[in-house]
DNA sequence: GTACATTTGTTCGTATGTATA
DNA sequence: GTATACATACGAACAAATGTA
């Protein structure tokens, strides 16, 4: 079961998606140093445009939850010690 | 002589290219079970980016006109009996 | 068997244009 | 005017499988 994105709510889609992914990280479903779903996959899974998926990941970078390697993917940050 | 792709028209380039290839199939120039031009060749021939060429072929798959064999190419589907 | 070229598959980076709220 | 969101289209890099020399 996946969380769904509300199209007409007050919260922008890219924030909703970032929140969803953050929950998936917190739940341990997305693990440290493992890749997030690709932009393409996020587009399909959550039915958003690529720009929206990218912005969501950008938010997660700003939240210091993931890092991105060009042409490789975005990865969950290992928990700081 | 090849059809040309209009850059600024209302029809997306990838659709235009798909249409061109469909006509080439219908005309018998591209024959059943024979390979389409490779993505690389389509890029050069029609001066489009690889993503555009790929999307065009994807359209032809959706139209059930071709099938793709990974690492081999895309081939014109034999006419159904 | 090895090396090389070809081809599709996948990923992120970037820019532009359109539409809507 | 600004922010959101979508679609198109370019580029770049690397992976993996296949076929050939």
Image: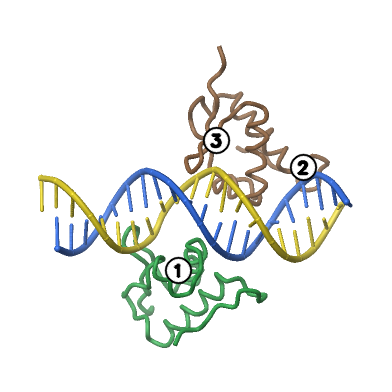
Chain colours: A brown, B green, C yellow, D blue
Q: Is residue D11 above or below residue B76?
A: above
User: Badge 1 is on which residue?
Assistant: B43
Secondary structure type for disc 3: strand
Using the image, name the chain to which the residue with label 2 belongs.
Answer: A
- C-alpha separation, residue under disc 3 versus residue under disc 2: 22 Å
Q: Which residue lies at the image location 52% right of the left edge and 78% below the top edge?
A: B19
Q: Which residue lies at the image location 60% right of the left edge and 37% below the top edge?
A: A1
Q: Is residue B63 above or below residue A18?
A: below
Q: Nearer the viewer, residue B27 or A77?
A: A77
Percent of width and height locating residue C4: 23, 55
User: Badge 2 is on which residue?
Assistant: A12
Do discs 3 and 1 share a chain?
no
Would residue B80 be found to the left or right of residue D7 on screen?
Answer: left
User: Badge 3 is on which residue?
Assistant: A68
**For the residues carrying marks 2 and 1, which lies nearer the camera in this image?**
1
Would residue A58 be found to the left or right of residue B34 on screen?
Answer: right
Q: Is residue D18 above or below residue B4?
A: above
Q: Earlier in the sequence, mark 3 or mark 2?
A: 2
- C-alpha separation, residue under disc 2 versus residue under disc 1: 37 Å
Percent of width and height locating residue A79: 56, 18
- C-alpha separation, residue under disc 3 versus residue under disc 1: 29 Å
């Amino acid at each position: 079961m996946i969380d769904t994105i509300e199209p007409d709510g007050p919260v922008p889609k890219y924030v909703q998606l970032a929140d969803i992914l953050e929950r998936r990280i917190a739940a341990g479903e997305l693990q440290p140093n493992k890749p997030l779903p690709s932009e393409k996959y996020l587009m399909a899974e959550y039915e958003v445009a690529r720009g929206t998926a990218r912005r969501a990941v950008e938010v997660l970078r700003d939240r210091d939850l993931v890092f991105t390697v060009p042409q490789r993917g975005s990865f969950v940050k290992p928990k700081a010690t």
